């Protein structure tokens, strides 16, 4: 499987914020899929994730980043530590999204920016994922927290990136290996095929990921 071979995601981030020379915090870095692209473009990069195994894997593969085990709800950093705080497809994974955004607010310096990438509930890849774990309520909760936060919205756009599977067999095996403890379930396979329609038989199978990007600035610091 190839994810975002065209590097649409990092391209969208660079459209809206200047990474060069910036002190950047990535919240929810996972195993470093996007971190490795940020590392070559930012001045100083710290990346956190609550999953110990992911952090171990990221440290093994990326040497120029300060990786730490941590959550957006309880950041260990001093006030005003960063020019840019990013939640990369991770805000909706927090139990208290509002608290995570307050922590981002605290750790941002004057004129700092908050960048959030969140999946759209109606995107193709997200609808496939929802057959295993339905995140609709969590995503809607995260979007509500963004609207109610102490930030002004500067930019908001929706974009698409591609997940490319060699064939339908790879599509099925990827999802069951990553999202289910059970063997391939015929009912879920039928639902996946129905959701994708005729293109389930394409080679490769290209599934669209619909992403929302928000670029925000702190309300009180905007007035300084």
Image: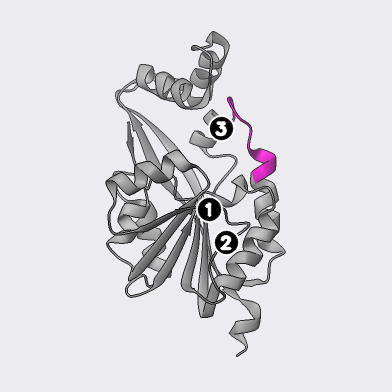
Q: Secondary structure at mark 2?
A: loop
Magenta-colored stretch includes residue 115? no
- Sequence-first tag of 2 and 3: 2
Q: Secondary structure at mark 1?
A: loop
- Sequence-first tag of 2 and 1: 1
Q: Secondary structure at mark 3?
A: helix
Give the main secondary structure, helix, strand or loop, of the magenta stretch. loop
Residue where numbered disc 3 is placed: 127
- Sequence-first tag of 3 and 1: 1
Q: Residue at x 63, y 71 (%)?
A: 151
Label total for image = 3
Give the camera-side residue of 187 and 135.
135
Labels 2 and 3 touching (C-beta < 8 A): no
Side of 98 where 53 appears, left or right: left
Question: Which residues are drawn in magenta?
Answer: 130-138
Q: Give the numbered dot on residue 75.
A: 2
Q: Residue at x 38, y 40 (%)?
A: 162
Q: Give the numbered dot on residue 78.
A: none
Side of 153 where 95 appears, left or right: right
- Picture layout, residue 168 above or below residue 36: above
Nearer mark to the viewer, of 2 and 3: 2
Q: Residue at x 60, y 76 (%)?
A: 218
Residue 133 x, y percent position in the rendering: 60, 30
Labels 2 and 1 touching (C-beta < 8 A): yes
- Picture layout, residue 26 above or below residue 21: above
Q: Which residue is farthest bottom?
A: 224
Residue where numbered disc 1 is placed: 70
Image quarter in which the N terminus is found: top left
């Amino acid at each position: 499987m190839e994810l975002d071979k065209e590097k649409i995601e990092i391209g969208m981030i660079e459209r809206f914020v200047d990474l060069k020379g910036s002190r950047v915090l990535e919240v929810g870095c996972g195993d470093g899929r996007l971190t490795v692209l940020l590392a070559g473009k930012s001045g100083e990069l710290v990346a956190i994730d609550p999953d110990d195994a992911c952090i171990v894997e990221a440290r093994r593969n990326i040497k120029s980043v300060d990786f730490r085990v941590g959550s957006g709800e309880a950041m260990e950093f001093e006030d005003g530590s960063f020019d840019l705080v990013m939640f990369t497809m991770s805000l909706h994974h927090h139990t208290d999204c509002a608290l995570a955004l307050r922590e981002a607010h605290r750790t941002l310096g004057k004129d700092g920016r908050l960048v959030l990438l969140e999946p759209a509930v109606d995107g193709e890849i997200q609808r496939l994922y929802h057959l295993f774990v339905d995140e609709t309520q969590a995503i809607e909760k995260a979007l509500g927290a963004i609207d109610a936060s102490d930030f002004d919205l500067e930019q908001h756009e929706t974009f698409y990136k591609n997940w490319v599977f060699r064939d339908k067999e790879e599509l099925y095996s990827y999802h069951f290996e990553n999202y289910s403890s059970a063997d391939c379930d015929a009912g879920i396979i039928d639902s996946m095929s129905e959701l994708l329609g005729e293109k389930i038989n394409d080679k490769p199978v290209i599934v669209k990921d619909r992403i929302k990007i928000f670029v925000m600035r702190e309300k009180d610091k905007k007035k300084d």
